[in-house]
Amino acid sequence: MAGVTGEQEKEEVKLDEEKMAQFSKLVSEKEFERFQEYLQNLNDGSIEKSSLFTFDESIDDKNIRSQIHLLFKSTENFETDTLMEGDSRRIRVFLKHCLSANKRKKMNIINRKSDAEKDAP
């Protein structure tokens, strides 16, 4: 897998307890359980690290969407974007370092640079 070291491949993918608690307050119980299952599947290898998690439910409240994006942005492992289909606003979550530029382009995911990358020469 391009861009992923052996160490990153073996590392358990998770959100810390505090972030999981925050996340559970922002989404429905169903979506929270689906996300936990996504993490478990990533860790046991039943899905590829490049797999995206897409919320089933539209998150129409922009404030809640922003809070979810900020929560994941504050982690080292995850990145998010909003999938807009008509009036529906669903969030996609994925591992930062596991999507190739080609897959990002196919999935119409904008490559967001971290603050450190922006400041680099």
Image (cartoon, rainbow, N blue to C red):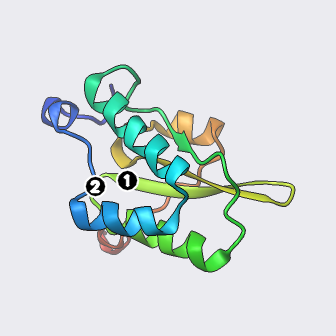
Residue 40, compared with residue 19, is above or below; it is above
37 or 12: nearer the viewer:
37
77 or 21: nearer the viewer:
21
Q: Residue 2: which quarter of the image? A: top left
Q: In the rendered structure, find residue 15 and report the number of the disc placed on it.
A: 2
* Residue that protrudes farthest toward the front in the picture: 29
- Determine whether, in the image, residue 71 is placed left or right of residue 89: left
Q: Residue at x 55, y 74 (%)?
A: 66
- Determine whether, in the image, residue 73 is placed left or right of residue 3: right
Q: Residue 103: which quarter of the image? A: top right
Amino acid beneath label 2: Leu
Name the quarter where the C terminus is drawn: bottom left
User: How far across and how far down the image is residue 22, in percent?
Assistant: 37, 69
66 or 105: nearer the viewer:
66
* Residue that protrudes farthest toward the top in the picture: 46
- Determine whether, in the image, residue 41 is placed left or right of residue 9: right
Residue 54, compared with residue 111, is above or below; it is above
User: Which is in the foreground here, disc 1 or disc 2?
Assistant: 2
Q: Residue at x 19, y 33 (%)?
A: 5
Alpha carbons under labels 1 and 2: distance apart: 9 Å
User: How far across and how far down the image is residue 43, in percent?
Assistant: 27, 31
Residue 112, compared with residue 7, is above or below; it is below
Residue at the spot of label 1: 78
Q: Residue at x 68, y 74 (%)?
A: 61
Q: Residue at x 57, y 57 (%)?
A: 81
User: How far across and how far down the image is residue 28, in percent?
Assistant: 55, 58
Mark positioned earlier in the residue sequence (1 or 2): 2
Provide the secondary structure element on which disc 2 rests: loop
Provide the secondary structure element on which disc 1 rests: strand
Answer yes or no: do the residues labelled 1 and 2 have beta carbons within 8 Å? Answer: yes
* Residue that protrudes farthest toward the left in the picture: 7
